[in-house]
Amino acid sequence: MAQDMPDAKAEFVQERLLEAAAEALASGSNAAMPLRIVAARAGATTGAIQYYFGDKRGLLLAVMRKHGLRVVARLQLLETDTLPAPQVRVRKILFEFLPLDEERRHECIVADAFESLAVQDPAMADAWREQYALLAKLIADQLPYDSETRARHLLAFTAGLRTDVLLGLLTAEDAIASLDSFIELAVSPGTAQP
C-alpha cells in the first residue's frame, strides 16, 4: 500500500499540470504560456513539468492527448449505433464539436489553440492529424457511401461553425440549423458532395 502512494501522488501532480496547461490554453495563453505560471497554477514546480513531460511541447502534447481521449470517451457514450438514420448519428457526433454548452465551449477553445499550435509545430501537427483521422473514421463509419470524403467535409464545416460561434458571428441556433442542412446534403443519396 505504501508503494501505491508515490504513484497516486505522481498521477495527481501530472493531472494538475495537465489541467493548468489546458486552462492556460483556454484563456488564450497558447504557446507563450510560461511554464512557471502553469506550474504555479498546478501547485507544482517547473521541475515537475520537466520530470513528467520533458518540456513545454511534451506538456502540450499530453494535454492534446488527454483532450482527445476525453472527447472520444464522451462520443463512445453516445451509443450512435442504436440510432436509426445516418443523419441522426452524424448529428449527434458533430454536435459534440460545437460550443453549445460551457464544457464544449471550453473544449472548443482548447481545440482551436491546439490547431493553431499544430500549424507551426510538426510534432503537434502529427498528433492533430492522428486525432483528426480517428474522428473522420468515426463519422465515415456512420455514412452509407463515399464516406471518407463526406466525413472530411463534415468535419471541416463543423470546424468553421465552431469558430464562427466562438467569435460571435453565429448564434448556437444558427450553427445548429446550418449543420443540420449540411448533414442532410452530405448524407442524402443522390446529392452532389457538399
Image (cartoon, rainbow, N blue to C red):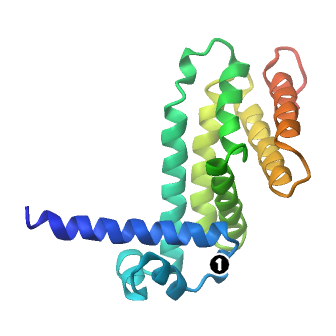
Task: Tell me where residue 101 appears, x and y as whole percent.
Answer: 68, 45
Residue count near mark 1 (Cα–Cα under 10 Å), binned few <14, some 14–19, many ≥20: some
Frontmost residue, 18 versus 105: 105
Kindly identify the residue that appears in the image at 89 percent across and 47 percent down.
170
How many circles with numbers are drawn on the protein?
A: 1
Q: Is residue 49 left or right of residue 9?
A: right
Q: What residue is shown with label 1?
A: 31
Q: Amino acid at mark 1?
A: Ala
Kindly identify the residue that appears in the image at 87 percent across and 44 percent down.
171
Q: Residue furthest left?
A: 1
**Quarter occupied by residue 11:** bottom left
Kindly identify the residue that appears in the image at 83 percent across and 22 percent down.
184
Q: Is residue 52 left or right of residue 133?
A: left
Q: Quadrant of the C terminus?
A: top right
Q: Is residue 182 above or below residue 59?
A: above
Frontmost residue, 149 versus 118: 118
Q: Quadrant of the N terminus?
A: bottom left
Q: Is residue 68 above or below residue 2?
A: above
Task: Tell me where residue 36 appears, x and y as whole percent.
Answer: 50, 88
Kindly identify the residue that appears in the image at 70 percent across and 73 percent down.
120
**Quarter occupied by residue 179:** top right
Frontmost residue, 119 versus 23: 23
Q: Is residue 34 above or below residue 164?
A: below
Task: Tell me where residue 31 appears, x and y as whole percent.
Answer: 65, 78
Q: Is residue 166 left or right of residue 28?
A: right
Q: Secondary structure at mark 1?
A: helix
Frontmost residue, 163 versus 86: 163
